[in-house]
Amino acid sequence: MIFVFGGAYQGKTEYALQEFGAETVCDISEEGEPDFSKDIVTGIEGFVARCAEQGVEPAEYFASRRNQWEDTILIVTDVSQGVVPIDSRVRAAREANGRLMIYLAKEADQVHRVFCGIGKRIK
């Protein structure tokens, strides 16, 4: 698995499409669950927020499906920067996103950070 992360609107998906020759994309930022048959699954932070609202731990969700995403590029927006939200639900989603990112980085064959459309392999 290749894990790509970075801030919002930094060109993560475009980077992955160009860098790895991926063709198919599943965007779960607004709705749905990951379709790991696609080359890229992006918008995972939206899925994490929905999981947090339902009391589901996203890292456990991904761990239980480990064999399904071994050959997938997973893209997550890093929401850990900035002011800590007052709303406890938003904080819970942000913390769950961080736990998932830690898990994915640990499991990944490669980890890339994208900033201003420029990717840097960090693992």
Image (cartoon, rainbow, N blue to C red):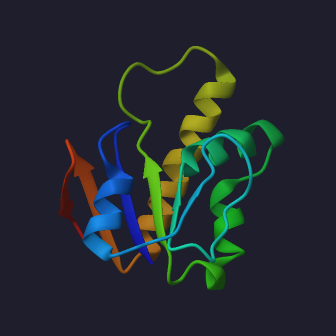
Left or right: 110, with 56 as reference point: left
> Which quadrant: the C terminus?
bottom left
Q: Residue at x 28, y 59 (%)?
A: 15
> As displayed, is residue 87 above or below residue 32?
above
Quarter of the view holding residue 93? top right
Q: Residue at x 34, y 39 (%)?
A: 7
> As displayed, is residue 3 above or below residue 114?
below
Task: From the top left corner, tell me how far across and down residue 92 is, in percent.
Answer: 64, 34
Q: Residue at x 22, y 45 (%)?
A: 115
Task: From the top left corner, tell me how far across and down residue 107 is, in percent.
Answer: 46, 76
- Of residues 54 and 35, the one nearer the viewer is 35
Quarter of the view holding residue 83? top left
Task: From the top left corner, tell me how far across and down residue 86 is, in percent.
Answer: 57, 14
> Which quadrant: the N terminus?
bottom left
Task: From the top left corner, tell me how far across and down residue 36 is, in percent.
Answer: 63, 73
> As displayed, is residue 69 above or below residue 55?
below
Number of numbered markers: 0
